[in-house]
Image: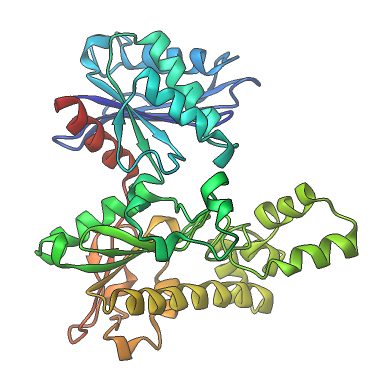
């Protein structure tokens, strides 16, 4: 079975054609600068790659048509015809409280996704455009929506309720939703396989650390708490996002610097995090290089991040009454031995202990715990596209 996975942004579209049964990737790539000048990247397995070619893409429909044309191209394609695409899996950022799992897309589902637009105004409208473009070009192909928020719908009210007047939740749906759900779900399933135990018996803490970062407490395979909140701005400090802070700071800075709320949120979303502290970069590799050269602000930015990760690990171990394994995934989690060691240092009292030799690994599955550690520390590369394809296949097969 071949599944086309689509992740549509406002001016970009990532795609991957893969077989979820064999986990074989047939082709993947990216459409960029949609509505501007159009750049197309196509990487077919075992054939000639196309990098950032100029292709006119006034809308997402032309972008998806370009993808489909490449996939069935007689010389460089990977399938003989469109009939070999059995289903399409769409990443949708926000499903609100309406969707606790992936669903087959119908007119009713589309209307409900649109109702969630106010909760993710930058992402959901773009996701919807991607779905509509595919429906137009592939009218007979089943489509599935896979939500970033769905995995976290198992959180209990004690974890998702904010201490605001309750009518804001009842009327305006203000609560913790959490994100990166597809990634947390995938790595928790891989962790259970690596540990050789049923996921129902495990308490896991999943650390998805990258330019956007979140940590999730997973008890028996279900999310019971997560660090991101109503929006992806909450929790850990990130590449350019502030993470958790005292809301009173907003009023103080807005009054002092004459900012309106949009300007303030722009600072919190795009000028804060490790880039804000370091004034160097949002890229952790740049900060590690600067730290090695003695830059104290780069060092401070990295330590603030590591300290926040450590606090969440401790908090979630307490919330679940124990932990069997801590998972590190995503760009920094998979490729940052320094981050992993710094975040876990001092947690020996919980049974968490890293072996520095094993921890030199980057980007591949590995148990990096010390032999005598009671809690396993696992490096697991995330694969959101595969998880989307697996969910899509399961729903289409029924």
Quadrant of the image for the C terminus? top left
x and y, in percent, of residue 97 in the image? 41, 44
**43 in relation to 191, above or below:** above
Instruction: Tell me if 189 is positioned left or right of 50 in this view.
Output: left
Q: Name the residue rendered at 57%, 76% in the picture.
A: 304
x and y, in percent, of residue 289 in the image? 57, 68
Q: How many marks?
A: 0
**392 in relation to 294, above or below:** above
Q: Nearer the viewer, residue 221 or 270?
A: 221
x and y, in percent, of residue 160 in the image? 44, 60
Q: Name the residue rendered at 28%, 81% in the picture.
A: 355
x and y, in percent, of residue 69 in the image? 38, 11
> Would you say residue 120 is visible in this rendering?
no
> Would you say residue 134 is visible in this rendering?
yes
Q: Name the residue rendered at 35%, 80% in the picture.
A: 318
In terms of image quadrants, where is residue 209? Answer: bottom left
């Amino acid at each position: 079975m071949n599944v086309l996975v689509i992740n549509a942004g406002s001016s970009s579209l990532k795609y991957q054609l893969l077989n979820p049964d064999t986990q074989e990737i047939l082709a993947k790539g990216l459409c960029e600068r949609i509505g501007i000048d159009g750049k197309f990247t196509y990487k077919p397995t075992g054939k000639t790659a196309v990098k950032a070619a100029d292709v006119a893409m006034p809308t997402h429909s032309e972008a998806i048509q370009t993808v489909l044309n490449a996939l069935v191209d007689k010389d460089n394609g990977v399938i003989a015809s469109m009939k070999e695409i059995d289903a399409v899996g769409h990443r949708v950022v926000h499903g609100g409280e309406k969707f606790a799992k992936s669903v087959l897309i119908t007119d009713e589902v589309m209307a409900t996704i649109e109702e969630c637009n106010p909760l993710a105004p930058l992402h959901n409208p773009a996701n919807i455009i991607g779905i509509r473009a595919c429906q137009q070009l592939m009218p007979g192909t089943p489509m599935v929506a896979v939500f970033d928020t769905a995995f976290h719908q198992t959180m209990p009210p004690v974890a998702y309720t904010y201490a605001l007047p309750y009518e804001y939740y009842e009327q305006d749906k203000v609560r913790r939703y959490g994100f990166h759900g597809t990634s947390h779900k995938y790595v928790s399933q891989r962790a259970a396989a690596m540990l050789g135990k049923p996921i129902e018996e495990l308490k896991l803490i999943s650390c998805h650390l990258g330019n956007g970062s979140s940590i999730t407490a997973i008890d028996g395979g279900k999310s019971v708490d997560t660090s991101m909140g109503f929006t992806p701005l909450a929790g850990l400090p990130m590449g350019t996002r502030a993470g958790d802070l005292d809301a009173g700071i907003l009023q103080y800075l807005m009054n002092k610097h004459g900012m309106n709320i949009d300007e303030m949120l722009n600072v919190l979303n795009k000028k804060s995090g490790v880039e804000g502290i370091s004034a160097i970069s949002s890229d952790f590799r740049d900060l590690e290089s600067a730290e090695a050269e003695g830059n104290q602000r780069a060092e401070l930015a990295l330590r603030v991040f590591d300290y926040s990760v450590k606090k969440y690990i401790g908090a979630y171990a307490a919330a679940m009454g124990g932990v069997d394994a801590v998972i590190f995934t995503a760009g920094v989690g998979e490729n940052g031995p320094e981050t992993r060691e710094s975040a876990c240092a001092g947690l020996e009292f919980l049974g968490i202990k890293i072996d520095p030799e094993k921890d030199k690994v980057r980007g591949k599955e590995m148990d990096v715990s010390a032999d005598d550690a009671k809690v396993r520390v696992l490096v697991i590369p995330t694969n959101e596209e595969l998880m989307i394809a697996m969910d899509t296949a399961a729903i289409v097969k029924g």
